[in-house]
Amino acid sequence: MLKTNKGFTLIELLVVIAIIGILSSIVLASLNTARDRANRAAAQANLSGVLPAAVICTDDGTALNHAATPGTTLVCAGSTAVWPTLPTGWSYTVSGDWDLTTSDGNFEYSAAGPSSATITCSETGCVAS
């Protein structure tokens, strides 16, 4: 009589578990990259949302306020817009002069995030680098 084995050997099971482990580590690495890109896009969207208020402030000759407390600090005196809160790991950086009472109407504000990512906004728009 022939004895037929039904099932898998231990080696076959270990190989399958190893392959699943390798594939899951690749997927998790891809998810982290996607999460970083999503946070960068969210930060850029938040900063772009402030642009209209900043342009109106500079057109009126009103100085921009530094985003000391995001979510509560007004963009400028007389504005109802506030500096938005940024995703975790992102913070506003002071670049140049925040006192924009000069007649040229130029301004620049930026935010720094993880992995040396920065987003700089000026009167012409926001650029990520």
Image (cartoon, rainbow, N blue to C red):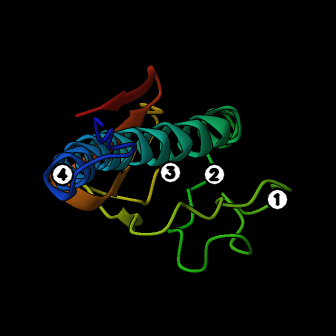
Residue 46 in percent (x, y) is at 61, 45
Between residues 22 and 124, which one lies in front from this camera angle?
Answer: 22
- How busy is the neighbourhood of tag 2: few (under 14 within 10 Å), some, or many (20 plus)? many
Please name which of the two marks, 4 or 2, marks the residue nearer to the observer: 4
- The residues bearing labels 3 and 2 have C-alpha atoms spaced at a distance of 6 Å
Left or right side of 54 for 89: left
> Where does the C terminus fall, quadrant-wise?
top left
Q: Earlier in the sequence, mark 3 or mark 1?
A: 1
The residue identified by callout 3 is 101
Q: Which of marks 4 and 2 is nearer the N terminus?
A: 4
- The residues bearing labels 4 and 2 have C-alpha atoms spaced at a distance of 63 Å
The amino acid type of the residue labelled 4 equals Ala
- How busy is the neighbourhood of tag 4: few (under 14 within 10 Å), some, or many (20 plus)? few
- Relative to 35, is 115 above or below? below
Q: Is mark 2 on a helix, strand or loop?
A: loop
The amino acid type of the residue labelled 3 equals Thr
The quarter of the displayed image where residue 120 is located: top left
Evaluate if marks 3 and 2 touch, with contact meaning CB atoms under 8 Å apart: yes
Residue shown at the point (86%, 56%) measured from the top left: 80
Q: Which of marks 1 and 2 is nearer the N terminus?
A: 2
Residue shown at the point (50%, 51%) measured from the top left: 101
Q: Which of marks 3 and 4 is nearer the N terminus?
A: 4
The residue identified by callout 2 is 62
The quarter of the displayed image where residue 89 is located: bottom left
- The residues bearing labels 3 and 4 have C-alpha atoms spaced at a distance of 63 Å
The residue identified by callout 4 is 18
Evaluate if marks 3 and 1 touch, with contact meaning CB atoms under 8 Å apart: no
- The residues bearing labels 3 and 1 have C-alpha atoms spaced at a distance of 14 Å
Residue shown at the point (66%, 38%) measured from the top left: 49
